[in-house]
Amino acid sequence: MRIIKVKDYQGMSKKVAIIMASQINMKSDCVLGLATGDTPLGMYNELVYMYKEGLIDFKDVITFNLDEYYGIPKDNSQSYKYYMNKNFFNHINIDLENTHIPNGMTDDIEEECRRYDNLIKKMGNIDIQVLGIGRNGHIGFNEPDIQFESCTHLVELDEGTVKANSRFFDNIEDVPKKAISMGIKNIMHAKKIILMASGEEKADAVKKAVEGSISPEVPASVLQLHPDAYLILDEAAASKLSK
Ligand code: F6R
């Protein structure tokens, strides 16, 4: 696990966008693992800018998102499908057929999870997986006490995660309590992992993930076992690290 410290959110977003752009330029049909939430928004903006400048071409790029809320239709403005189109896919030349997000409206959860796992495998696994981190150390929606051997599955979101997600909804009652998420096993099979964290509210989770023991209580700590994982942290997120 390598730590790269940058000054602030903008520095983090630029650094990760440059890494992603290099990957796309080296392998035009690469498979990207993508995240939603606040953290990657700046990186998506940077990538859109690079695309508009003619520096990257998304024509053959394939993407898999980490997760989707369960029970929210994909055209609902709260769905992660909607988020991805609005913040990224609608602004680049990606083929939408190559963008994959779990189907949160499935009536056969097991089959949907199996389909997602098989599709990732069929595409040769993920070349670069981008992650954010929850305040409780979750990655994807793998909440504390997750089994490390989990593949795509239905998750029950922690109370704290529901509360954190409520900033995007009018009422906390409207926040979905379940999601379909890639598992730790899918994430760990990615060839390269980039976890991004910005802000003081992530500093405790970052410290536990980097300096704590490897334990399902802090799902991100599993990244210590990955051979090619990077944490790109701004000063605030890195502020509690002792080294
Ligand atoms: C999002 C995801 C989550 C977020 C995490 C941090 O697809 O899987 O793990 O990355 O909850 O969210 P933000 O970036 O909003 O602080």
Image (cartoon, grey):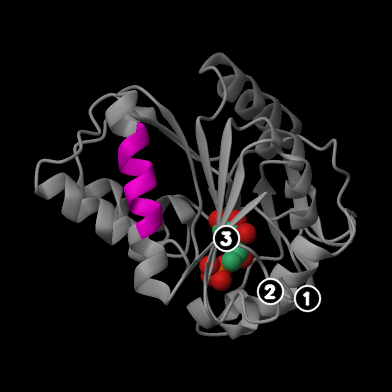
The residue carrying pointer 3 sits among few (fewer than 14), some (14 to 19) or many (20 or more) residues within 10 Å by Cα, namely: many
Above or below, comparing residue 135 to residue 152 in the picture? below
The earlier-in-sequence mark between 3 and 2 is 3
Using the image, tell me which numbered label, if any, was put on residue 162.
2
- Residue matched to label 1: 159
Is residue 173 visible in the rendered image? The answer is: no
Q: Which amino acid, by three-letter code, is at mark 3?
A: Gly
Instruction: Using the numbered discs, state the Cα–Cα distance from disc 3 to disc 1 in whole angstroms.
Output: 18 Å
Q: Quadrant of ligand 1?
A: bottom right
Looking at the picture, how far across and down is residue 66, in whole percent? Answer: 58, 46
Left/right of residue 151 with respect to residue 96 in the rendered view: right
The part of the image, by quadrant, that contains residue 14 is bottom left
Which residue is found at the position 34% from the left and 65% from the top?
A: 42
Q: Which residue is under mark 3? A: 132
Position in image of residue 128 (x %, y %): 50, 37
Lower position in the chain sequence, tag 3 or tag 1:
3
Residue placed most toward the observer, 203 or 38: 203
Looking at numbered disc 1 in the image, what kind of residue is underneath it? Glu
Contact check, label 3 and label 2, Cβ < 8 Å: no
Magenta residues, start to end: 15-23
